[in-house]
Each structure stands twice: as structure tokens, then as C-alpha cells.
Amino acid sequence: MPFRRHHVLIALTGSIALGLAAPAAQPAIGAPRADAPDPHARAGWWAFARGDEALSVAIDPLDGRLWEGTEGGGVVVWDTTGRTFQQHLFPNQPGLRSNTVYDIAFDPRNGDAWLATANGLTHVARATGWWTAYTPPSLAPSTPSAEVEIVPDGLPPFRVWSAVAVAPDGTLWAGVPEADRALDVSDASTLKTLSPDGGVVRRTPDGRWTWFPFHPDLEAGPRRSTVADLAVLGDGRIVIAHGRRGNTDVALTLYDPRTDRWSAIESVGPVGDVAKGPRTGQVMQLAVTPEPGGGESLWLATWSRGVYRWRDGRWSAFGRDGGAAEPSAGLCGDQVWAIAAAPDAVWVSCAARSGEDGAGVSRYDRVADAWRSIGTADGLPTGIVTAIAARPGGAFLGTDEPTTRHTGGIGVVPLRTDGGAPIIDAPLSTAVDGRTPAANETTAIVTDPQGRLWVGTRGAGLLGWDPRDGRWRQWTTASTGGALPGDAVGAVAVRGDHLWIASTRTRQGDGEDVDGGLAELDRATGAIVRTLRPAPGGLPSGQPSSLAVAADGRLFIGLGSASGGVGVDVHQGEGLAAFDPESNTWTIWDHSNGLGGDTVLGLAATPDAVWAALSYATDHSAAAKRVGGGVGALEAAQWRTWRTDDFGLNGFREESITGDVRAIAAGADGSVWAGTYRVDGKVVGHWPLVDATVNRYDPLSRAWRSATFPGDGWVAAIAHDSAGRVWLGTTRGLSGEFWRADEVRGDRDATMDKHDLAEGGIWLGRRIDGAWERLTGDDSGLPSRSVAALAVDESNGHVWVGTSDAGVAVFAGEEPYGPTDPGRPIGRDRSRLTYHVWLPAVQR
């Protein structure tokens, strides 16, 4: 349907609503542009992400709206009565620097919100709707921003913040999830030479910042460096919970601002007297309740010992299996993720013993002094509840998906008790009416000649976005009656009026593969017209993971997956297949007839050849060695293979493994670019913090040249834009995925994080041996450093970025997709601001 664009002026009050806008067209792909748009300009970027994987939820004390901090989906503010929402995403929302938000707290004086994010602290002023991010100079954006306030003194150089709390006088307290460096407390001679680390910061209402770091040789800060949660007691004391890391002899750290003194509450040990303290120092979250007779209780959610209550210096404990004290009937478990309190009840959520799944929630009736568990058998749509906002007569339960599934989460579950059986309402989800993509974990991305976007996901099937109506659509195995052979999509490719979709194997049942194959979709109707599953004489494997359309019209299908990729049975590929859709004929290649590696992770077609990114696979010998890998080229029906070190090809090589190439793309000048990685020494000791490497093949010299980016993982995607630049997307797979069980309040490998100093994201250059620019969230609008896919829209030059954890972003150049940044108003008065917005209008 034809459409035209209207340039309109919209007056907005308060925060920016995330409307969708269709940008003005740019010149088509062709000769390099002299006036190439600057990808460092945040205003040229826009992000799309689902906000249904909750890390924190909090109720606005003034208007009752529910704020949800998400993993990769920014901040979602819900009007729970009308079930409507506003989603605030980086870079769309000025003043927000990350779409992963761990904690939310409100200033009791004025209702201002404070956010602890994966990239700084953000303040949301209620009176003006202005968002401001606070950062130290070392982490400030490379270009000045009116919404980023640089704090030269008192704010430590930490990027990730895990917890926030606001005292009654408006003093902010914030903590970090881990120290930047390990402190060897066993060697006292080194302590005075070590820099202070971790801990908490304080911001007074007049804007003065003070850092209280952990250091075992000091008494002026918390006793452990990591901070999982913060709470403010009625007498003004600050309580710090430290999570699962570090010295677990210390259960809590307390600070009394009246005396400026720090103290600690020690664990009594696994068999200690629970009347004297908690039996563990692994305190995950805190809650405070006033008591009817005066005073208050402090509640502790612990990882392995249930729930503790501290009142007037006396301790009591609740556990399911006796780890805390006598078993408490109705408590959902001893591994407690989250805790929240309302005047009538205390709510907790529990993990299954493995920490990979959830065990639902429990409600403690403070009058009846009894627990009641609520789980999936009671109608709860999931047992994984990662955050709770308690309210009189019920709670809002923020949920997440299991680590083994990638379907996008279900959102926030409203639950009411009304003094009887729980009443569970439908989840509050942002993925309604196509307003957001169905999942944030993308794997493949392509545009078609009509400007429509097609996105493969790790477990939510195929997504489509049409700029004519700005809506997202979804195809899954269930919604297509099985026509889509699997919901883990490894690749998509446009061939004429159709779209080909490669679904990889993701599960097994009774020893048999139950999904994986190819689907052909009619782009005009959205119907799947052909499904191909593994069969003798046909598709040789249920794990197709790369696609390309050759000049002769054949569809080339690479088979096999890799670590950090999509699907199961990694590095167990079965070669490469070519399919002619018109004649239904197949041609198969593997190690036995010239292919240099049986795991084919990427494909690219040129007018006279098909190029393959080859990884290694297990051979068929009794020794079951892992062999092969490199770059392959099929030209004149013959394969040629370059292994690592052949004619300058740079990459990974170890024993019989000759390469692990993950991405490949062809340039307009006849060059071929291959993405891989290299590592000094054994890969096992470095993975995934290997050195991303890209190679360029010169067809004239018939040799390779390379560039390497230390510590950035591997080059997972390559694209060429209309300005003659090469875009390289790097990733570390899912190593950067955040989840409550294994991150801030869990047992994620801190050693890897401390050494993961590379920025990652996108590298941008014109020549293999020239200067490369890095794009990150600090100096552009890129919302994630884990890039899974890249595509350039040939109709307008826009660069689309698929991320592993934060949805989809687009660099549109001069014309942004949403409201442009109007600059900081004088006096921060945003009562009436005018934005330029592009909106599509259908021409009937």
C-alpha cells in the first residue's frame, strides 16, 4: 500500500512517549557518499525491544503507577488500571544510558525516581519529566550531552549499579554488584597498596557525592565490596545486603548517619543459633515493615537458608527444608530470590534448587503468622518470579524466562488475595498489538525491497516489521500449525517474492530430533507455502544455520551451529546443501567431496562464486577428532579452501582444527570479508574473551589481510553501507546475558567480568589496514555490545543491528525514527516542548 510521510509538530508534556516514525529516504546503496552520516550521533539511532523480562518492579508512591526495570527492554511504566504503558528505551529516551535496569527507588519527598542501570545512575524528575544520567569522567560520553551529568568528585568509576534506596530526607544511596578487582585478604602486606573498591555512594539532597568503598584495612565503609540490595530503616540507618559473592561471613553492613559509624552483622554459620543471627551471609534482598505496636522489622531473603526477620535486635527464621530453623509450612523454598512487604503481608519468590528455574512465590500473612505458597498449580503462569512489588491485598510479580528458553518473557503478573484464594490476572505485557518485537534475543536480520524488516530470534520464531504501519508480527511453530519447523531461527534470506527461513534444532524428545528445517514464506501474504524437513535425498540436517541465494537462483544452506550460536549439537555440522526451488533438486558437499569444514556458519554470494564461513566439526574416525575450518569458495563447481595461515588468513587454529570462521560478506569491489577470532594459547582458558578478527580477501593479489580487536570476542556480523564503510559486529555470545539467578544477585562468574575490559559492539572502517572507529553505547546509540546480525536497507541506506540481548536498533542517519532530542530546556522546564516527529500516513 503506498504511503506518504507527514512532518508534524507534537507538543508533549512530561516524559517522551515512544511513538514510531518513518524516516525520510536516503540515497540508495551505490557510490560512497561524501557526506556520510555520523553513526556517533545518538539522534540518528532508534531501538526496538520487548520489556517483559523483569529485574525490578516498584510502585510509584504518589500516583500508583508500576515501574518495571527490565533486562534489555529499558523502563516500562504501567497504568495497571487501564493496562497501558510507556516504554523508555536507550537511545530513544534522553538521560537513560542502558536498557538493563536492576533497581528502582522513589524519593519520598517528591516522587522522583532513581534507577540503577548497567550503565550509570539515572534520575527522573517528577515535576519536569527530565531524565538525567550521572557518570564519572572516565565513563562519560565522547560527545557532550545535556542529559548526562558528569560527576568529577565522589562518584567512582563503575559502570554497573545494582541497587538504589532513598532516605526520607532525599539522600540517595547506591551500590555496585561487584568489585573491579579481587582483593587478596590473605596477604596483609599488600592491603595498603590496593586501591579501594566496590561499596556504596551517597548523594545528599544538595548534590554532593561521597564514595564509601570496601577495603579490609578501613573502617569507613561496608564490610563487603558487592551490593545486592539497600534498605533504609526508620531511624535513618542504611542496611546493605551483599548477595552471594565474597566473604559470606558478613551477612549485613549497617551505616548510622547520626554517628557516621559503620558496623556489620555476622553470620552465625550453618549450624549456629538462629536467635543470634542468620546462618548465611548470602543475603539477596531486603524489606522493611512497620509493626503495629511500634518499631519495625527488617526482612532478609537469603539464597540457601530461607527468610529471616530482625526486630528489636531479635532474630527469627523461616525455612522450608530446615536450613534456617524448623521448617515453615507454605514457604516456597530456601533459595529466595526476592522479598517485598506491604502492611498486611510479606511476599517472597523462590528459585528451584538448581537456580535454573523458579518455585513460585509465598505470602506471609502478618496477622495469622502463616505462609502460603502460590505456584503454577494455582494458576501462576510461570514459577520464575524475579521481582516483587507488594501492595495491600496483593502484589505485582515481575517474571523472567528460563535460561534455556528465549521466547521473550511474559511480563508482570498482577495477583490479588482479597483474604482468600489468590486471583491471578493476565500478565501485563509490552508485546501487545505489535508495539514491540516478541523477543530481544535476535540471531538474523534482513530487509526486503519494500523496506520491510525480517528478524530471526533465538526461540521466538520469525519477526516482521513493516514501516507502513509500524507494527511487529510474529510467526512461530504453534501459530503456523507446524509450518515453521522450529522457533530458533538461525538465518533468513530474501529470494524474489519469498523469504526463506532456517530453523535450527533446539530440543530432542525420545532420542529423536523434533524440530529444525526450512520454511518458504510468501512475503505478500505472510503465508508459509513450503516446509522442508530432513529427509533422505533432501535436506541432510535439521540444523540449517546459514543461507544465501546464488546468482543462478539456488538456495545455499549451511549446516551446523557453534558455541555462542543458535541450536544444539554445536560443531557437529553436516556440510553444505544447495537447493533449486524450481526443480526440487539438491546438491550436497561435505569434507568427503571438497568442503573444508562441515560446520558452515555463514554464506555470501557473488556473481561468480559462493563463499562459506567454515568452522570445525567432529570427524567420523574412532578418535572423534575436531577437524577443519577456514574459508571456502565454490567457483566453477570446484571448492577452494583457505585454512588459518593460508595466504595470510588470520584466525583460530589448534591441533587438527584449522579455523573457526563465523561470518562472511562480499564487498562491492569484489573483496570478501571473513569474521573470526584469534587467541594466544589454549582457547579453553580464554573463551569467550578472545580477540575478534576480520580478514579481507583481495581478488587481485589473491591474498588475505587482517585486523584484530583484542578481547572483543568474535566478529559475528559484517555489512557494507552506502558510504563505503564496513560495519563489523562483535559478540561474546550469551556470556553477557543478565538473569537474576546468575548475575547481580546470583553467582555469575565475576572473574570473567573483571577481565572483560573490551567494549565490543561495532567497529567501523573503510580499509582493512586503516583506522577503525568503535561504536558503543557511550559514544553512539548502539544499545548493546553483543551484536548478532547486521543488514543494510538498500532502499534508503539505513543500517539495522540485531543484538543478542537488547532487541533491534537502526542507524537512520540524518532522519531519526522517533522524537528528536530538543536539548536541555532553560531551568529544565519541560511543561511544553515541541518535537519533530516523522509519522506515516496511509494514502487511500
Image (spheres, rainbow, N blue to C red):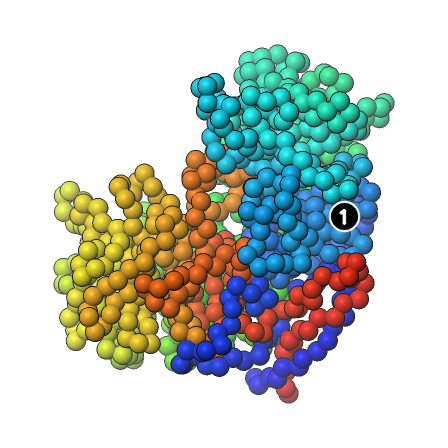
* Residue 141 in which image quadrant: bottom right
Whether residue 340 is visible, yes or no, is: yes
The number of numbered discs placed on residues in the rendered structure image is: 1
Seen at 51% across and 23% down, the residue is: 192
Residue under circle 1? 112
Q: Where in the figure is residue 337, as x and y percent of width and height?
A: 59, 35
Q: Where in the figure is residue 370, as x and y percent of width and height?
A: 71, 26
Residue that sits furthest to the top in the current view: 273
Q: Is residue 745 left or right of residue 770?
A: right
Q: Is residue 434 left or right of residue 548?
A: right
Q: Amino acid at mark 1?
A: Asp
| Residue in front for this viewpoint, 172 or 84 | 172
Seen at 46% across and 19% down, the residue is: 189
Residue that sits furthest to the right in the current view: 293
750 over 445 or under it: above or below: above
Seen at 46% across and 40% down, the residue is: 753
Q: Where in the figure is residue 523, as x and y percent of width and height?
A: 46, 76
* Residue 248 in which image quadrant: top right
Seen at 70% across and 54% down, the residue is: 131
Q: Residues within 10 Å of mark 1 (few under 14, many from 20)?
A: many
Q: Is residue 109 left or right of residue 479?
A: right
262 over 716 or under it: above or below: above
433 over 441 or under it: above or below: below
Q: Secondary structure at mark 1?
A: loop
Q: Quadrant of the N terminus?
A: bottom right
| Residue in front for this viewpoint, 124 or 571 | 124
Q: Where in the figure is residue 94, as x and y percent of width and height?
A: 65, 59
Q: Quadrant of the C terminus?
A: bottom right
Residue that sits furthest to the bottom in the current view: 844
| Residue in front for this viewpoint, 16 or 201 | 201
